[in-house]
Image (cartoon, grey):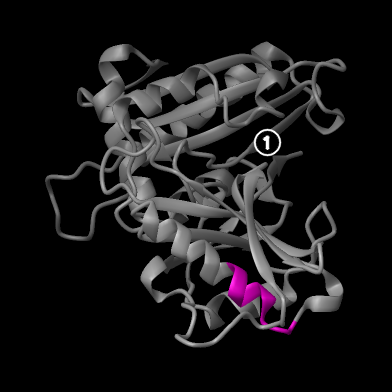
Amino acid sequence: MSDIQVRPFRRDDRDQLTRLVNAHAGAVVPGMSVSVNTVLGSLERRPDEFIEDPWVSERVTLVAEQHSRVAAAAYLLRYYPDDRAGPAYRDAGEISWLLYWPLAPAGNPFWPDVTGAAEALMAACAGVFGEWGVTSQGAGGELPVPGVYGVPEQWPHIAALYQRSGFTHTGHTEIVYLAQVEDLPRPVEGSGPPLDGLTVRRSVGINGCRLSAVLGGEVVGYIETEILDQGERLSRHGGWADVGNLHVAAGYRRRGVGSWLLGQAASWLRLAQVSRLLDYAWLEGADPTGQDYDDYRAFLPAVGFRELTRTARGWTKD
């Protein structure tokens, strides 16, 4: 009898599953982890994904157990086949994420090779899609962890498994950046804003607190930052935030407004005891909103961000 068993997730798997999630997250974003409750809650629904999550009609979590250990796990979604889902998602099956423990370095006889368990799990995922009768299949790595999505370059074992299973990266690549808030621009003592009369206005934004740059009554730019350690999202090391939006009107770019806005946001985040800030950019081209990231990729390192990873989003199977 095989020592590998693929079965539905049970509640008593929760600690092992959380360790598997956090091991993969921690290889992408330093010190990042989430609580058991966050992982369990994400298997039921993702309220932060308020657009796409209501399109889901079924959810299944599978684990591959080997030698009484959760060696691999996958979270599958089925989308409605009608107008209850967005056109690109209708009647689709998706591996929202699939994780497994990688092969140990050579010479370690105590860490078992779980590649067989991962491949058995992938075969079970294909079986679920067959039972659902979906018309398209996708895959990714959208963990309930800030900054961890797609298939990051730190997960070569996941990318290789997807490729062996017939999935191809057909989407785009994003860069994830991290800055220490202390390293972000600070106002120089005795100096004013980059443009005479420029002031900052704070309000509620769609992706966190919005700080707007206002000149003569006109909003010429804004930044939104969202604090990520509310409730039990993160299990330790609080003090994380990410940039939800940073925009400067075309006529005011390359005039110091973006750096000034980031400095204003950094001052606000310090008051909230936030120490680390995430941001994101497409590797090439423009996103669906039309934003071109060429200048933004040059801007972020110049103001204190460092690249953490490049992650491949959008895996599909013919």
Q: Is residue 127 above or below residue 234?
A: above
**Which quadrant of the figure has residue 245?**
bottom right
Q: Is residue 244 left or right of residue 109?
A: right
Q: Which residue corresponds to the image point at 67% horizontal and 82% vertical from the top-left?
A: 256
Q: Where, quadrant-wise, is the N terminus in this rendering?
A: top left
The percent position of residue 308, horizontal first and vertical second, equals: 45, 66
Residue 286 on the magenta span: no
Q: Is residue 292 above or below residue 21?
A: below
Q: Is residue 259 above or below residue 205?
A: below
Q: Which residue corresponds to the image point at 57% horizontal and 25% vertical from the top-left?
A: 47
The percent position of residue 265, horizontal first and vertical second, equals: 53, 62
**Which quadrant of the figure has residue 118?**
top left
Mark 1: give few (<14), some (14-19) or many (20+) Cα within 10 Å: many
Q: Secondary structure at mark 1?
A: strand
Q: Where, quadrant-wise, is the C terminus in this rendering?
A: top right
Q: Which residue corresponds to the image point at 68% horizontal and 73% vertical from the top-left?
A: 296
- Residue numbers of the magenta segment: 254-261
- Residue holding disc 1: 138
Asked whether the viewer can see residue 92, the reply is yes
Asked whether the viewer can see residue 1, the reply is no
The percent position of residue 100, horizontal first and vertical second, equals: 37, 39
Mark 1 belongs to which amino acid?
Gly
Badge count = 1
79 or 244, nearer to the observer: 244
**Which quadrant of the figure has residue 30?**
bottom left
